[in-house]
Amino acid sequence: MLNRTLLMPSLSASLFYKEIDLLHPISFDQVFQYERFNSLCNRFVRLGRYSDLGNQTRKYDLRKGSGRKWTVERDLEQLKQSSRGPIDKYQVISMAGKNPFLWHDHWPVKDYARVFECLVLVDEIAKEADKVVSKIRRIGRKLRSKTNFGAEGSSLSHAPYVAIHMRVEIDWMIHCKKLEQRSRISQICSSKQEIMERVGNIVGLGSTAIVYLAVADSLLNDSSILDGWKRGLVPFEKKKLGVDGIYKKHSYLIQSAIDYEVCSRADIFVGNSFSTFSSLIVLERTQRVIRRGITSSCGIDVRWPSYAYNIPGESNGPQKWMTNMSDSNLKAISYGSNAISC
C-alpha cells in the first residue's frame, strides 16, 4: 500500500510540430477537485501543497540517468534501491536528469486505476461537459424521431452516441509515422478513410447513430472530416454541433479535459491504442464494465464498449478494447500497444 504525500502536480500536454504556445501547464486543482481527491484516496496516496511542507530546504537529491542507456529496468532498479535508503526521512525529493521514464510507469495497472477513481472534475469543467453531452443527446433524439430507429416501442429518453478520438491532426501524423518507422509497427497511424470504414463496420451499431468527433480543431489540416461517412452515421464536430463557443472560452488543456469527459460518457468509444488520451478513457470505461461483474467483452455485448480503430477486428471493424488490469506496469497505457484484448 502506498502512503506517500505528493506535491500537487501540474498538468501538461505532449504536442509535436509547432504548437508550443499550447503547451503551458496548468495546476491540478484547475481540472480536478483537490480536497475530494485526498478524501477518496485517503490512506493510499495524497496530494500536498509546497507551502504545507515543514522543511522546504532539506531535500533528497535523486539523479536519474539519461539517454538510451537508461532503460526501464535500470529505472525500476533505482526505485527499489531508493525505497531501501534514507529517502523516507525527507519531505522533498529533487530529481535531476533527462530520461523518458518516470516512477509511476512502474505502477501496476490496478494501483493506477485506483488513483483514477479519486479524480473528480471541478464543477466548471463538469458543467461544460454536461452542456456538450446534452446537446449531442438532444440532436440524437430529434434524429431518431425521424427514422425507424425511433419507431413505436423504442424509448427516445436516451439517445446513444459514438465518440471517436479521431487522431488525424498534423502533430499526431508526424509523430505516429516516426513511431511506426522506429518501432517497425504498422498499426499506429490511421487515415480518415480507414477510421470511417472501421467505425461503420462495428457489429450491432445500428442503422442510425450520432458520431461525435473529438479532434483538436486548431491542429486540423483536413476540413473534410464530416464527409464520406457510412449512411446512417451522422458526424458532428464542435462547430457543427454548435458548442465551439464552450471550448473557445478555455485553454487547450481545459478543452482536452472537456473532450475527455464527453468521450468517457459515450455509449460507444473508439480511439487509437497508441494514444495515451484514448488509453486512459478505455481504462476508466473498463473499470465501469468490471464493476458490473464483466471481465471480458469478447463475443458479448457490454455496456460502454470501447474499440481501437487502428487495429482491425470483427467484420473489418475496429478491435474491441478493454484495459488489461493485470499488467504489472503502465507501458501499454503510457506508450501504446497493438497487443490489446477485449
Image (cartoon, helix red, strand yellow):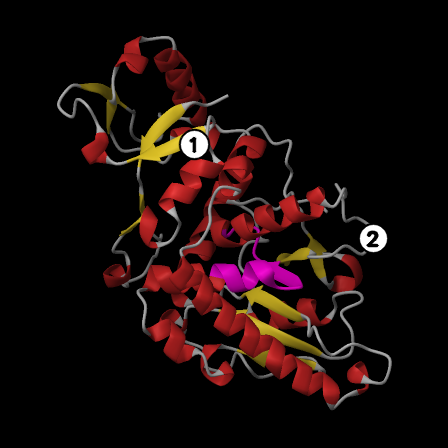
Which residue is farthest bottom? 146
Rate crowding at label 2 as few (under 14), some (14 to 19) or many (20 or more) other CA atoms within 10 Å: few
For marks 2 and 1, give the CA distance.
33 Å
Rate crowding at label 1 as few (under 14), some (14 to 19) or many (20 or more) other CA atoms within 10 Å: few
Q: Is residue 294 above or below residue 107?
A: below
Task: Indicate whether residue 262 is drawn in magenta.
Answer: yes
The image shows residue 2 at horizontal and vertical percentages of: 46, 23
Residue stretch rendered in magenta on the structure? 260-275
Counting residues from the start of the chain, the first of labels 2 and 1 encountered is 1
The image shows residue 44 at horizontal and vertical percentages of: 47, 27
The residue where tag 1 is placed is 104
Between 322 and 67, the one lying in front of the other is: 322
The residue where tag 2 is placed is 300
Three-letter amino acid code of the residue under disc 2 = Ile
Q: Is residue 254 above or below residue 61?
A: below
Looking at the rendered structure, the secondary structure element under dot 2 is loop
Between 322 and 117, the one lying in front of the other is: 117
Q: Is residue 118 above or below residue 99?
A: below
Identified at 79% across, 48% down, the residue is 298
Which residue is farthest left? 57
Three-letter amino acid code of the residue under disc 1 = His
Q: Which mark is residue 261?
A: none
Identified at 57% across, 44% down, the residue is 337
Indicate the quadrant where residue 101 lies.
Answer: top left
The image shows residue 194 at horizontal and vertical percentages of: 62, 68
